[in-house]
Image (cartoon, coloured by chain):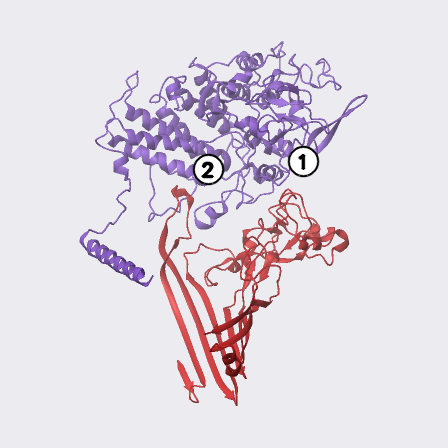
Amino acid sequence: MKEMNYKHVKWVALVGLMSAVFACKSDLEVEPIELQTIYQVFDRNDSAGVEANRFLLDCYRFLPTTGNRVGGDFLDAATDDAVSSNPTNTSVQQLAMGTYTSDNYPDNQWASYYQGIRRTSIFINHIDRVPLKGKLANGTPFNRVWKAEARFLRALFYFELVKRYGGVPLLGNKVYQLNDNIELPRAEFRECVEFIVSECDAVKDSLRTDPFDLAFYERPTKGAALALKARVLLYAASPLFNGGNIDPQNPLTGYTDGSDDRWLAAETAARDVIEMNLFSLQPEFRDVFITRNPERIFSKQGGNNTSVENNNGPVGYSTGVNNGRTSPTQELVDAFGMANGLPIDDPESGYDENDPYANRDGRFYATLFYNGAPWLGRPVETFEGGADKPGGTKQQTKTGYYLRKFMGNFETAVNYSNVNHDHILFRYAEVLLNFAEARNERLAAPDGEVYTAVEQIRERAGLQPFQLPAGLSKDQMREVIRNERRKELAFEEHRFYDVRRWKVAEQEFNKDLSAMTIYQTGTGVIRQRTPVLKMNFEERMYLAPIPFSEVIKNPQMTQNPGW
Amino acid sequence: MDLSLWDSKFRLSAEYYRDTYYDLLQQRGSTIELIGIGYPNENIGKNRYEGQEVALTYRDHLGKFHYFIAANASRMRTEVIYMNEVYQKYPWNRRTGMPVGQTFGYLADGLIRTQEEADAAPRLGGSEVHPGDVRLVDLNNDGIINIYDQTAIGNTKPIVFYGATLGFNVAGVDFSVLLQGVANRTYQQTDYAFGSGGDRQGFAYLLGRWTPETAETATYPRLTLGADPTNTPYLNNSSYWTRSGEYLRIRNIDLGYTFPFAVSRRIRVSSLRIFANAQNLFTVTPYDRLDPEINGDTAYPIQRVFNFGVNIKL
């Protein structure tokens, strides 16, 4: 025993001595030899640009996603369209109830988008080092295409910030280093809009041209740049920023004046997308979300899976995972009119309170599960004690409804199978609604073009008749468009911002939300409207608070009013 | 300093140190996120550790009664001298000058007893406050509990370790005891094992929960299904959950008897001793639900061990 230990010591000593000798001989490694430098990524000797392309694809990682994104819930569960089924105090519930401060804003994306902005700027600054040989069919060299993609992404990242916070610091192409002064002030709202629009204009003709090229489906095309421009101009023309600035003389929170010309700019930008004559409405509404089709303008890749089904499926199905996370409200249900195109409170609509789910707008069936809806071979049971609302502590619907939208067509299937769940960021129906809204606001009364745009949406939805009554006033048409937007774009992260930019959140997001409690009795069904959540909204919530840490660390950073 | 007196019967050693560590690797305070990358650790921190250590020993005998006492104590004061701290609006928010690793959080002022108190209580991020919730102290009196109300919670005084060994032997009987203790120490322990679904193990302390009937005597907030920011400890790190980490512990106690040589010779061994000892026999600590040396309720506590035995030398 002793002998062995002694041997051991000798070996250790020898190894130690050897390493000392060799250490003296080698040079000091001032940086890790495996470190990949920016000059290796943007290699002057790589005309294929393999590493540079990887770097670009990594920038796409920062694109916004949709779906169960905010603490496991849809952002739309922070609107009057839905509540979270989660029994605990979730992020979206904090958003809905206004229980947040500047240091715990539940959808704080500040750091993430500035990371995306940094990466895209690095790419933009260095891609011209790489002698790319490739060209698009129309002759645009890849250097230009790739750089345009990075600039588009960066513009979209800025838009995501601006819609939350108003004006934010614009960094240009500068990539800040640790020793630089990064105490930057916010740019004016106006400057941010101008920057995003000018970037869209600058890159639109350098981007890829075919939005349906499946090999490059994740890449933005001209249509994406124009659709982004149309959206940012629509936001900029909206009351919250254009004339209704919550802090009227504060250029960070919106324009300090109001101008109808901004509606014209928004209308023109939307018209530019329409007149590309490239995109069209997918005939079947449900298929928009589960197939790659001509309605999609730009998406973040989401892959083929059953994520939406698993997260939001009614909880009573034992085949597959069904967490029922989203509980759409009675308010959203009521927003859907009838298949004949009339709202349910119209005496002519044929709406029957005792059979409320019959003959509704086709999008109702594609968006929600209601008591009796077909799914996986049996009717959904959201009556008290039903398979999908069993009671007890299990997470289940709070409202009597579940989310159906974005799911595959599993009405008669025995189990889920993978379907496409890309995150659709821009689609043609939104552009049509943007166009109709902007033009209606600009004109004294809606004309045929406004009607046509809205009626296209209604026609595709299967309304019969889809035509709107002639002679609607501007105000009436505004209500129609807002209602169509709510139904058409539900759960696509529009309403949360739409209601804000229309500056009606103090009414729309400041009320009791309702559930439909359904009792199945021996003699029939009793339905009772019951309150489920009280939303709270204060004026300051029109804009998100700049993260507290950014304000205390940076003396130049101005907080939004009220935070 | 070392001192030895009376033929080494009494020995004393005392030390004083005051060390300043600089260029400590840490993240800067002004980590403005506009830069778009995570900030690396840099050589910027400066901390001071200052303290005293005293050890004394006394051994003597009264006839055949031999005894000894050895005691030691140390005290350590730490201070953050520089940490590139950002501007803090209120002095109580400042971490520079506080002990290294100081816990920050909200101050708690017991539980809210009545609805009137709940209506008057400041809110955490606009959330609702109910009777039975922890009442947080609104240091800047703006009616809202937020980051401006966070301050140093728990102990800020220099930590003190102390210990003593006492022993004697007389007429074959030997005895020694090792005591060990800590003063000026606290830790955060949330006692929240009930779980957000109410489906995890409940412990006896839940019986002290707030109910309207026990509003005056409750020792634990009202129970809620699901995490609630007003009473869920991990959402509001408050002094309600600060526990004393002070303790005095009998680390080891040992009693033995060595038989006289006349006895051991008869059974043909050179020495025979029987003994009993115990480790961690006894602990005095103000918060005794958990072992004060183990932070957290998931770690395995230090065991209490009893030994009985016989030593035989052939």
The quarter of the image holding the N terminus of chain A is: bottom left
Q: Residue under circle 1?
A: A533
Q: Is residue A195 visible?
A: no
Residue extending farthest to the right is A523
The quarter of the image holding the C terminus of chain A is: top right
Tags 2 and 1 touching, CB below 8 Å = no
Secondary element at tag 1: strand
Residue B138 at what x, y percent from top left? Answer: 61, 55
Chain of the residue where label 2 is placed in the rendered structure = A
Chain of the residue where label 1 is placed in the rendered structure = A
Q: Residue at x 47, y 33 (%)?
A: A160
The three-letter code of the residue at mark 2 reads Gly
Q: Residue under circle 2?
A: A167
Residue A493 at what x, y percent from top left? Answer: 54, 29
Of residues B49 and B93, the one drawn nearer to the viewer in this rendering: B49
Position of residue A161 relative to residue B271, above or below, is above
Position of residue A350 relative to residue A166, above or below, is above
Q: Residue at x 32, y 33 (%)?
A: A123
Residue A89 at what x, y percent from top left? Answer: 61, 41
Residue A140 at what x, y percent from top left? Answer: 29, 20
The chain drawn purple is chain what? A
Residue A397 numbered mark, or none: none
Colour chosen for chain B: red
Position of residue B53 relative to residue A406, above or below, is below
Q: Identify the image quadrant of residue B22.
A: bottom left
Q: Identify the image quadrant of residue A330.
A: top right
